[in-house]
Image: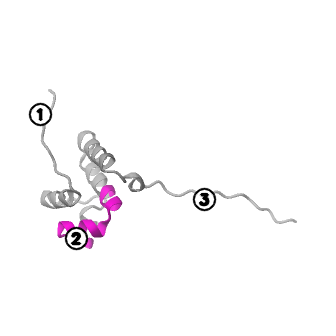
Amino acid sequence: MGEVHKNQATISEFDISDYLDDDEVITEYLNTALEEGDNDDVLRAIRHVAKAVGIAAISNKSGLSRSNLHKALSDGAKPQFATIMKVLRALGRDIQVTPRDA
């Protein structure tokens, strides 16, 4: 019996962090998560942006250790608000409150 060769395509897993390479894109991504998502969506978006920018850089700028940063941004985590603010500020971002439409 002869040897069978199959063409195999390598499919890599989609990672949004690979596309968060522009300040405008990052801002829009975070704002969309804040406007349309729940707490987990917002945390996930912050994690994606932190990964895109670099965990080590965010760790240095925020004063959080890399391990604490990973824990705070992991799925199911419930980080303190102060931690989220440190990360956002390390990303060069702030939260702004605006009135909601009734």
| Nearer the observer, 64 or 94 | 94
Where 40 sits versus 79, above or below?
above
Residue 17 in percent (x, y) is at 38, 56
Residue in view at x 27 percent, y 43 percent: 37
Determine which quarter of the picture holds residue 91. Answer: bottom left
The magenta segment: 48-68
Disc 3 residue type (three-letter): Thr
Residue 13 vs residue 94: left or right?
right
Q: CA distance from mark 2 to mark 3?
A: 36 Å
Q: CA distance from mark 1 to mark 2?
A: 34 Å
Q: How many other residues sit within 10 Å of disc 3, few (<14), some (14-19) or many (≥20)?
A: few
Residue with the mark numbered 1: 99
| Nearer the observer, 23 or 40 | 23
Disc 2 residue type (three-letter): Asn
Marks 3 and 1, the one that precedes in the sequence: 3
Q: Main secondary structure of the magenta part?
A: helix
Question: The C terminus is located in which quarter?
Answer: top left
Q: Examine the structure image and report whether residue 50 is included in the region drawn in magenta.
A: yes
Residue 1 in percent (x, y) is at 88, 66
Residue with the mark numbered 3: 10
Residue with the mark numbered 2: 60
Q: How many other residues sit within 10 Å of disc 2, few (<14), some (14-19) or many (≥20)?
A: few
Residue in view at x 29 percent, y 70 percent: 56
Q: Nearer the viewer, mark 1 or mark 2?
A: 2
Residue 61 in percent (x, y) is at 20, 67
